[in-house]
Amino acid sequence: MIEERAFSKAQEGLLVLADISGYTAFVTQTEMDHSWEILHELLEVMVHSAQGKMEVSQVEGDAILFISGLEDEEVVKTVEDTFIGFHRRRRDMVAVTTCPCNACQQIGILKLKFVIHRGKFSRQRLGGVEQLHGSDVIVPHRLAKNRVPTKEYLLATDAVLNRLSEERQRRFTPYEETFDLGVVKAGYESLGHLWERELAGERKEVKPEEALIDSTVIVDVPIDLVSELILRPEVIERYMLATKVEAFAGARGGELGTVFHCHHGYGVNFLRVIASDKGRQLTLGNTGAGGVMFLTMHLASHAENQTSIRRLWWWDQPANAEDAANTRLVVAGVARAGDEAMRTAFR
């Protein structure tokens, strides 16, 4: 007999289906072991991107069904961030992959689409597995098979669109489908422009002539050891002046794409490895409340058992001259403190 507590009361929230397109061809035409490793990594990145905003309800091979009790506008923004995170990791996986097998060579065919619906559902646990129950749960799955004329998109039902700002609603093209459930009115938005915009704003290297802050520190540690330690969480904690640093593995378990959550008293900054020439040069993106800053670090042997670390900072400066000057003063102070911390961070 199933215990009553295995079932929850009906609740209203958002149902978000994230579906990797190209999965069937990818799995059937490539090596099983590597294709699963690749898909698993991409699914993990999606879960990590949505953490704290959307909860995983079910993993369905090539798709994840999320639920959320947050406002629709915030969840749509999370979907956009998840889309960018997926493409960023896919790009980095392609860059670091040297395996010639079909799976590893065809990572680029995988794409991502989302379907969002607001409705009522209950949660039931059978045999230790949670399932969602309710007619609204069916809607995202039915809408995943559609006539939307683009491969990567966000398809949202009117139940969601009606709760978005007018500005955001205008981005969506009206759409409807008829099922046994009746007519479902919705709208879709192509997401490809988000990745294009992200690429346009990303810097893989801050050059000396464009750096807003340029500092050099000499550490009494040989370059090979500095190269080995510079991305260790306990070392980052020192030179990024953080109270705690959490690391999340990069593409195929390597450096590229690694994300560090740097906890400070005022919040969390997200440090991401954008480019890595191990032992010589490293570029990081530092995302915080003020936006994104880019930092390129050049390593060079200095004297016997010493290493020169040159740090070049760049960020999109505020239009207001006073704000720009104040920002530069603050970052310069942080950079100086970081340089001092670096002198002992590798010991």
Image (spheres, rainbow, N blue to C red):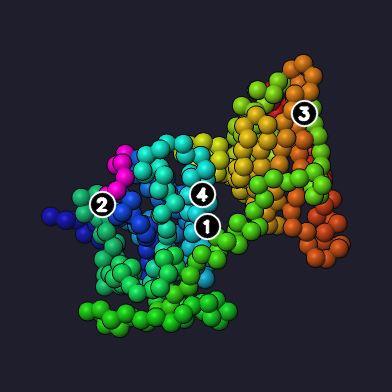
Give the number of the mark in front: 2 or 1.
1
Q: According to the image, label 3 marks what residue?
A: 308
Residue ranking furthest to the top:
304
Give the number of the mark in front: 3 or 4.
4
Total label count?
Answer: 4
- Look at label 1 and name its amino acid: Ile
Is residue 171 positioned above or below 332 on the image? below
Q: Decide: marks 2, 3 in contact (CB < 8 A)?
A: no
Quadrant occupied by the C terminus = top right
In the rendered structure, the answer to whether residue 251 lies left or right of residue 327 reads left
Q: According to the image, label 2 marks what residue?
A: 129
Residue at image location 66% in from the left, 57% down from the top: 201
Which is nearer the N-term, disc 2 or disc 4?
4
Q: According to the image, label 4 marks what residue?
A: 91
Q: Position of residue 31 (x, y in %)?
A: 31, 41
Where does the magenta region start and end?
28-33
Counting other residues with Cα less than 10 Å from the Cα at mark 2, is it few (<14), some (14-19), or many (20 or more)?
few
Q: Position of residue 198 (x, y in %)?
A: 60, 58
Is residue 210 positioned above or below 324 on the image? above
Which is nearer the N-term, disc 3 or disc 4?
4
Q: Position of residue 13 (x, y in %)?
A: 40, 69
Report whether residue 18 is seen: yes
